[in-house]
Image: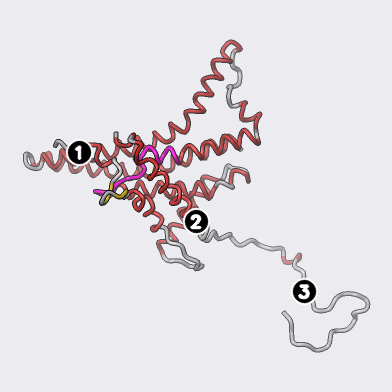
Amino acid sequence: MPQLDTSTWFTIIMAMLPTLYLITQLKLLSMNYYQPPLTKNPNLQTHNTCWRPKWTKTYLPHSQPQQS
Amino acid sequence: MNENLFTSFSAPTILGQPATIPIIMFPTLLIPTSKHLINNQLTTVQQNLIKLTLKQMMAPHNAKGQSWSLMLMSLITFITMTNLLGLLPHSFTPTTQLSMNLAMAIPLWAGTIITGLRFKTKNFLAHMLPQGTPTPLIPMLVMIETISLLIQPMALAVRLTANITAGHLLMHLIGNTMLTLSTINLSTTLLTSVLLMLLTILEIAVALIQAYVFTLLVNLYLHNNT
């Protein structure tokens, strides 16, 4: 059994470790794991208004370029 | 036929330099990376397969166990690739090397054991004795269970090595037989070649199954300890 000859063990192990590391870190980490789209309750969505519902701010701001 | 059967398992050298390093690192090239949202067919198939395996393997784990998923997925990818590449004729299979399998099995097993001892000491020690053991048997059983625990990484590594080595030896032997028979009897040669073909299909299955089994057992040890 040439597998039991320990002279090559170091090389083999030292080649195996970076390979596993490369597969882990460079290959699998960069894979795209798509999440299935989740449904949102439309009632819970808050609209971002450019004025605040405070009693002092009963007016619209000065006409400005539309902000999204 | 004086050729030593085991020559294909000794680590190859090219011009005195170890050829094992490029051979072991080659499977890395077969997993292309891409930053694109939509990939080519090869990458998509690979990603789907990896995702399928990931779901299958990591579903029973809690969050702590699932933190190992990247490691285990890369392990199964690596072992599958090496096993399948090793089935090509005139190629060297790194998974037949006991050293590599031990180097993969021992740290992973030790990692699970240390996790178990550190975070779930009671649970870990409870595995040392099955429930409902008669009192006089308790010391004996604890010793047996400890030995079986310590032998786990050896069994893991030797299982992979032995399976792949045995398959390659069998294919080697039947291939040689076929070559010898081809000068004597044609019908027997045909029969042997059918046998060899069936054996090759079996070996492809074994290559996949052994990679799965290796990862599954590491997975099991992890599950017992998290």
Q: Regarding mark 3 in the picture, which secondary structure is present there?
A: loop
State the image coordinates of residue B126 (x, y, percent, origin top left).
62, 26
Element at label 1: helix
Chain where mark 1 sits: B
Does dot 2 land on a helix, a strand or a loop? helix
Question: How is colour applied across the structure in the image?
Answer: secondary structure
CA separation in Å, label 3 and label 2? 38 Å
Q: Which residues are magenta?
A: B88-103
Residue topped by disc 3? A48
Q: Nearer the viewer, residue B217 or A8?
A: A8
- Please give left or right for residue B145 compared with residue B26 in the image: right
Chain bearing mark 3:
A
Q: Are marks 2 and 1 in contact (CB under 8 Å)?
A: no
Q: Is residue B92 magenta?
A: yes
Q: Is residue B5 above or below residue B15?
A: above
Label 2, on which residue? A28
Q: Are marks 1 and 3 in contact (CB under 8 Å)?
A: no
- For the C terminus of chain B, the image quarter is top right
Q: Position of residue B116 (x, y in %)?
A: 61, 35
Q: Which residue is mark 1?
A: B174
Mark 3 and mark 2, same subunit?
Answer: yes
Residue at the limit of the structure toward the bottom, as seen here:
A63
Please state if B82 lies on the left or on the right of B138 as rendered: left
Which of discs 1 and 3 lies nearer the camera? The answer is 1
Side of B38 relative to B62 (left or right): left
Name the mark on residue B220. none
